[in-house]
């Protein structure tokens, strides 16, 4: 019971920061970077489809993984002061910035 009460007050755990993601994306073989971005993109898309989230990102279905990586890397490069935040939230912010839903 006490453990359940503590769960509500515990800070959110972030396992992968924007700095971590940026480092992975700058590697010669950025497979972790691309996989992470695709995972976040798929999770957001699934949540939007299920109605759990409003439509946040309107990236073309024809976008390639490399294009999504380029969008996120540009956002991280242009906003270094935010890279201490969670990589997931920064990935969504980057995609929303590049392809906002109107």
Image: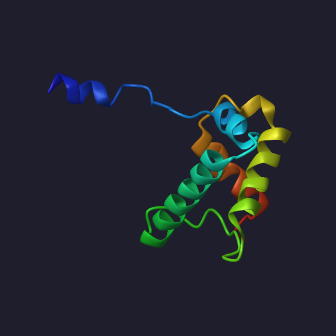
Q: Quadrant of residue 63?
A: bottom right
Q: In the image, 93: left or right of 13?
A: right
Q: Quadrant of the N terminus?
A: top left
Q: In the image, 101: left or right of 52?
A: right
- Give the residue displayed 68% in from the left and 50% down from the top: 93
Q: Residue furthest front?
A: 28
**Please, is residue 65 above or below residue 77 in the view?**
below
Where residue 65 sits: x, y (%)? 68, 63
- Number of numbered discs on residues: 0
Where residue 102 sits: x, y (%)? 72, 71
Q: Residue furthest bottom?
A: 62
| Residue 64 or residue 6, whichever sits in front | 64
**Please, is residue 70 above or below residue 24 in the view?**
below
Q: In the image, 80: left or right of 53?
A: right
| Residue 19 or residue 82, whichever sits in front | 19
- Give the residue displayed 73% in from the left and 64% down from the top: 100
Q: Quadrant of residue 59?
A: bottom right
- Give the residue displayed 59% in from the left and 58% down from the top: 38
């Amino acid at each position: 019971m006490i453990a359940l009460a503590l769960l509500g007050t515990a800070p959110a755990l972030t396992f992968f920061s924007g700095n971590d993601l940026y480092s992975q994306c700058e590697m010669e073989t950025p497979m972790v970077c691309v996989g992470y971005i695709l995972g976040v993109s798929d999770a957001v898309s699934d949540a939007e489809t299920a109605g759990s989230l409003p439509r946040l990102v309107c990236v073309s279905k024809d976008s390639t993984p490399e294009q999504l990586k380029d969008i996120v890397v540009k956002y991280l490069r242009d906003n270094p002061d935010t890279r201490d935040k969670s990589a997931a939230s920064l990935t969504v912010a980057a995609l929303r910035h590049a392809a906002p839903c109107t």
